[in-house]
């Protein structure tokens, strides 16, 4: 009972496999008629290989005395069927050979084309690479030149800054020196004035008159005898040390009574008339104190 049930399971499995392989109903019905399990299994394999039901009937109709011989015969028929299906005949072989030759030529031409394309592509890449390298080198040279220009500009700026700082220090030093000279000159003039003072009011009056004559009438005959105008001309008017505006200012100071020695405390070619006037006023204020 169990063997019969197992047999039915195998037959049902074989039917499902044949149905999945799209075998005809006639093929299924014929195989159901085969009682021998071994023969039916071989015929199922032949059906799956593509044999028709007529070819299987023909094989099964051959009478043999031994079942081993029949199985051998089924294998031989199946092998012949497969050879006829997959091994081409001479005409087909010729066509295949021609197709193979054409495919070989196409492959060769394709390979040559591929080699040519690769060579062209490589050449293009080399040209682009060289162009990029030249562009990079040019950019680096340009960048280096710009950096050199920037460096030179910074050095010039630094040099100008140093020069300005040096001039500033020099000017400060000269300014201090000038102030000291003015202060010393003021002290010297004050000492001279004190030494020249006379207790007598009469002598002071005579001295004042004399000083006024010297300051306001230096063009008179008596003043011409003095060397003060000559010293003034030699010191301030001769040469190009002072410009016209400075000379006019100094002449005015001379007319107002300043001596050449007094002018030395504020007369300078590097000062404007306004600056010299301010120094002159400072000197007079200090003398007044």
Image: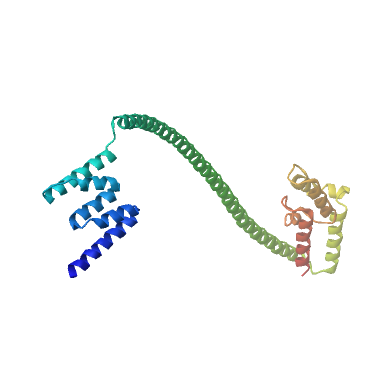
Residue sitting nearer the eye, 276 or 4:
4
Which residue lies at the image location 34% right of the left edge and 54% below the top edge? 25
Point out residue 75 in the picture as x, y percentages from the top left corner. 19, 46
Point out residue 74 in the picture as x, y percentages from the top left corner. 19, 47
Point out residue 135 in the picture as x, y percentages from the top left corner. 50, 39
- Is residue 108 depicted above or below 145 in this figure? above
Residue sitting nearer the eye, 9 or 164:
9
Which residue lies at the image location 83% right of the left edge and 49% below the top edge? 248
161 relative to 227 in the view: left or right: left
Residue sitting nearer the eye, 189 or 5:
5
288 relative to 130 in the view: left or right: right
Quadrant of the rendering where the C terminus is positioned: bottom right
Q: Quadrant of residue 174?
A: bottom right
- Is residue 9 depicted above or below 18 in this figure? below
Quadrant of the rendering where the N terminus is positioned: bottom left
Residue sitting nearer the eye, 136 or 219:
136
């Amino acid at each position: 009972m169990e063997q019969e049930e197992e047999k039915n399971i195998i037959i049902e499995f074989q039917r499902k496999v044949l149905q999945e392989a799209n075998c005809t109903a006639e093929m299924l019905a014929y195989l159901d008629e085969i009682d021998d399990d071994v023969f039916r299994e071989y015929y199922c394999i032949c059906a799956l290989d593509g044999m028709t039901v007529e070819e299987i009937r023909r094989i099964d109709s051959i009478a043999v005395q031994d079942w081993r011989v029949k199985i051998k015969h089924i294998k031989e028929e199946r092998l012949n069927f497969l050879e006829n299906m997959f091994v081409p005949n001479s005409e087909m072989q010729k066509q295949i050979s021609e197709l193979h030759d054409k495919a070989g030529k196409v492959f060769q031409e394709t390979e040559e084309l591929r080699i040519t394309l690769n060579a062209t592509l490589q050449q293009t890449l080399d040209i682009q690479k060289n162009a990029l390298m030249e562009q990079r080198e040019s950019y680096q040279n340009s960048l280096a030149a710009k950096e050199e220009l920037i460096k030179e500009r910074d050095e010039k700026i630094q040099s100008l800054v140093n020069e300005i700082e040096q001039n500033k220090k020099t000017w400060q030093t000269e300014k201090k020196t000038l102030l000291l000279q003015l202060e010393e000159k003021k002290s010297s003039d004050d000492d001279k004035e004190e030494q020249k003072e006379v207790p007598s009011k009469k002598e002071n009056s005579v001295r004042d008159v004399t000083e006024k004559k010297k300051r306001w009438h230096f063009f008179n005959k008596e003043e011409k005898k003095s060397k003060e105008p000559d010293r003034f001309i030699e010191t301030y008017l001769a040469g190009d040390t002072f410009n016209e505006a400075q000379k006019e200012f100094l002449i005015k100071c001379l007319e107002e009574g300043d001596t050449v020695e007094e002018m030395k405390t504020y007369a300078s070619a590097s000062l404007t008339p306004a600056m010299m006037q301010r120094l002159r006023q400072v000197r007079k204020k200090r003398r007044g104190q």
